[in-house]
Image: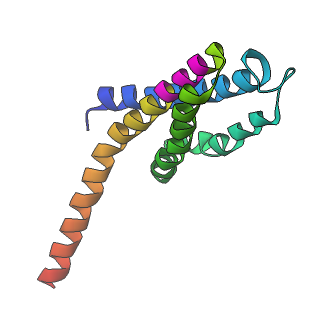
Amino acid sequence: MNTSRQSIYYYLTCGSLIALIVLLILWETVLAPLRPGGSWMVLKVIPILIPLRGILKKQIYTMQWSSMLILLYFTEGVVRVYSDKAWLSSVLAGLEVVLTVLFFFSVIFYLKPHKKAAKAAKIISQDQLKAE
């Protein structure tokens, strides 16, 4: 494993997730809420807060399922880029799309060596079973 490249992917993963959380909170409370003074849409941050601790602790399984969870936020961002009438809201949705794409690819590239190692270990264990 190339540790310097791995650490870059890890920091990109953490940074993009934290930036997305901050963006979603600010978007729905201060910057461009659906209703003046904030809206209940800020609750959409809760699902993305769940994997934060596991990602900060470099838990592989958490990174795997959070890469699928982030696609919901990508979808919401794409829909709101094209459907929101307010300019600022469309820009924030575009930023949401960028952050979700950054998270998705950085977590995939971070996990790639781990997946190769797991696959190699599985092949070795199967060869040992055949030898017995």
Q: Quadrant of residue 90?
A: top right
Q: How many marks?
A: 0
Q: Which residues are magenta?
A: 90-98
Instruction: Identify which residue is drawn at 26% across, 38% down.
Output: 1
Image location of residue 118, percent across then percent down: 29, 57
Residue 3 located left or right of residue 132: right
Residue at 49%, 43% (x, y): give it.
71
Q: Is residue 128 magenta?
A: no
In the image, residue 90 sits, relative to residue 40, either above or below, namely: above
Is 41 left or right of 24, judged from the image as shown?
Answer: right
Quarter of the image where one finds residue 25? top right
Relative vertical location of residue 61 with respect to residue 98 in this rendering, above or below? below
Locate residue 10, reporting x and y percent: 43, 32
Front residue (pair 123, 104): 104
The residue under the point 34% across, 32% down is: 6
**Magenta residues: mostly which secondary structure?**
helix
**Front residue of 59 and 94:** 94
Going by the picture, which residue comes out furthest to the bottom? 132
Q: Quadrant of the C terminus?
A: bottom left
Q: Position of residue 111 (x, y in %)?
A: 36, 44
Q: Is residue 94 magenta?
A: yes
